[in-house]
Amino acid sequence: MKAEAVVRSYKDLSKVERAFRNLKTAHLDVRPIHHHRPERVRAHVFVCMLAYYVVWHMRQALAPLLFQDDTKRTDDGFPVHSLETLLQDLATLTRNRMRFGRATFEQVTSPTPLQKRAFDLLEVPWRA
């Protein structure tokens, strides 16, 4: 191999290691399970890899809002987040079913400008 190919392969290895670390820790919190049947083991691995694939796509789409270097703000002026802190911020959006006597209605919190931007980047429509 040429030197450039060796360096590229080594850097790709770190991406694979990061993917496995993400599967096992904070991002997906996949725990060991004790399957014995081959079809269940394959199914479990498939679901884990599918979940990682979703997280990878979310990171790609949300890249403008996530840490990339030492900057503290995005080009849009939003504070820069890690994926975890951005998901925590998005988790503050709620939909509550309210009951007043016999009447019921839903109350939905309004997204902040940062939350709207995240939904736009994910191409997910936001319903108020």
Image (tube, rainbow, N blue to C red):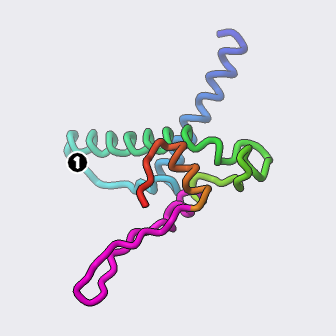
Amino acid type indicated by mark 1: His
Residue occupying image coordinates x 53% and y 61% = 111
Residue occupying image coordinates x 57% and y 44% = 62
Above or below: residue 126 compared with residue 37: below
Towards the viewer: 115 or 48: 115
Image position of 76 (left or right of 25)? right
Towards the viewer: 67 or 37: 67
Image position of 102 (left or right of 110)? left
Q: Where's residue 53, x and y in %?
A: 44, 39
Image position of 103 (left or right of 121)? left
Q: Residue furthest top?
A: 2
Q: Where's residue 45, x and y in %?
A: 34, 42
Label 1 CA crowd tier, 10 Å (few <14, some 14–19, many 20+): few
* 14 within the magenta span: no
Q: Residue furthest front?
A: 103
Q: Quadrant of residue 115?
A: bottom right
Q: Where's residue 71, x and y in %?
A: 79, 48
Towards the viewer: 3 or 92: 92
Please give the range of residues in magenta.
86-111
Tag 1 residue: 36
Above or below: residue 8 compared with residue 57: above
